[in-house]
Image (tube, rainbow, N blue to C red):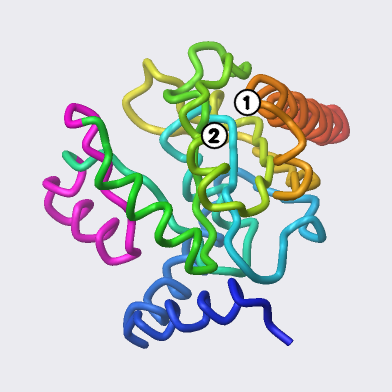
């Protein structure tokens, strides 16, 4: 039987039109094709993804490619957060609105976006966030900002650590456009709500950071092995 969160999640999925659901599935298939051809993207750890219920995905952030390439690792619908100003950019704004991205108003504190994020998590959906707060300047993981802990505490959903490596080389901060690269994505073991309640904020932040670093090390190792094997 489905849990309460799972039943709520199914009800929320029904709220989306079939057109949007099919469109999301088609967009994911096209992105997967491009991801494999241009970035040789591979993902491991699928078995760690909870099959139902709300999930807060915590990923490192190397480039603009990250939301799409991390999302390819899931068969479930993945919700994304985006600055509200991005919704004003013509076709791109329409696209992120079409896939139900959550607008975040950073200048206004982002309270409205946080409420919507919490609503979706409690409704049994998956939401991707980048706890570093911004893209990496060197490809390594920067110290995590504790703001996401509010969502973790209030939603009481699993925290799923995910790390990718290779998108910094594909599209660093100073580059205008992406270039071919090898990308690996590693999905780690989730932190259960029960475990989270036994930890204070500093301990929980450290636990997420530790698991994120472990996933990143594994993704980097896989990428190194791939590049070494292709020589």
Could you say which is closer to the camera, residue 84 or residue 9?
A: 9
Q: Residue 101 lies in magenta, yes or no? A: yes
Q: Which residue is mark 1?
A: 201
Residue 198 spot, x, y in % from top left: 77, 36
According to the image, label 2 marks what residue?
Answer: 149
Sequence-wise first label, 2 or 1: 2
The mark total stands at 2
**Residue at 54% in and 36% down:** 180
Q: Are marks 2 and 1 in contact (CB under 8 Å)?
A: yes
Q: Please, what secondary structure does the residue beneath circle 2 have?
A: helix
Q: Quadrant of the N terminus?
A: bottom right
Residue that appears at 33% across and 55% down: 116
Instruction: Report x, y in % for residue 127.
Output: 50, 53
Instruction: Estimate how packed mark 1 is, as few (under 14), some (14 to 19) or many (20 or more) residues with alpha carbons within 10 Å.
Output: some
Q: Which residues are magenta?
A: 86-108
Q: Which of the 4 quarters of the picture holds residue 201? A: top right
Q: Which of the two residues, 172 or 203, is positioned nearer the viewer here?
A: 203
Residue 219 vertical position relative to residue 92 in the rendered view, above or below: above
Q: Is residue 11 left or right of residue 51?
A: left
Residue 104 or residue 199, whichever sits in front? 199
Q: Can residue 101 be seen from the camera position used here? A: yes
**Is 25 left, or right, of 39 in this rendering?**
left
Q: CA distance from mark 2 to mark 1?
A: 7 Å
**Residue 193 magenta-drawn?**
no
Question: Vertical placement of 87 versus 119: above or below?
Answer: above
**Can you tell which quarter of the image residue 59 is in?**
top right
Residue 83 percent location from the top left of the image: 26, 39
Q: Quadrant of residue 110?
A: top left
Residue 119 on image: x %, y %? 40, 60
């Amino acid at each position: 039987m489905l849990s309460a969160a799972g039943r709520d999640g199914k009800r929320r999925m029904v709220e989306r039109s079939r057109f949007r659901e099919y469109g999301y599935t088609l967009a994911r298939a096209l992105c997967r094709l491009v991801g494999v051809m241009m970035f040789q993207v591979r993902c491991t750890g699928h078995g760690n993804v909870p099959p139902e219920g709300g999930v807060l995905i915590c990923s490192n952030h190397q480039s603009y490619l990250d939301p799409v390439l991390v999302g390819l690792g899931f068969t479930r619908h993945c919700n994304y957060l985006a600055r509200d100003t991005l919704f004003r950019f013509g076709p791109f704004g329409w696209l992120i609105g079409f896939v139900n991205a959550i607008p975040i108003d950073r200048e206004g504190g982002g309270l409205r976006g946080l409420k919507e994020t919490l609503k979706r998590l409690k409704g049994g959906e998956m939401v991707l966030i980048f706890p570093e707060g911004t893209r990496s300047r060197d490809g390594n993981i920067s110290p995590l900002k504790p703001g996401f802990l509010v969502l973790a505490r209030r939603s009481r959903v699993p925290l799923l650590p995910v790390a990718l490596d290779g998108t910094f080389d594909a599209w660093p901060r100073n580059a205008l456009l992406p270039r071919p690269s090898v990308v690996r994505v590693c999905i780690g073991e989730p932190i259960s709500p029960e475990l989270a309640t036994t930890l204070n904020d500093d301990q929980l932040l450290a636990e997420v950071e530790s698991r994120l670093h472990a996933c990143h090390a594994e993704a980097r190792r896989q990428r190194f092995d791939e590049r070494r094997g292709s020589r």
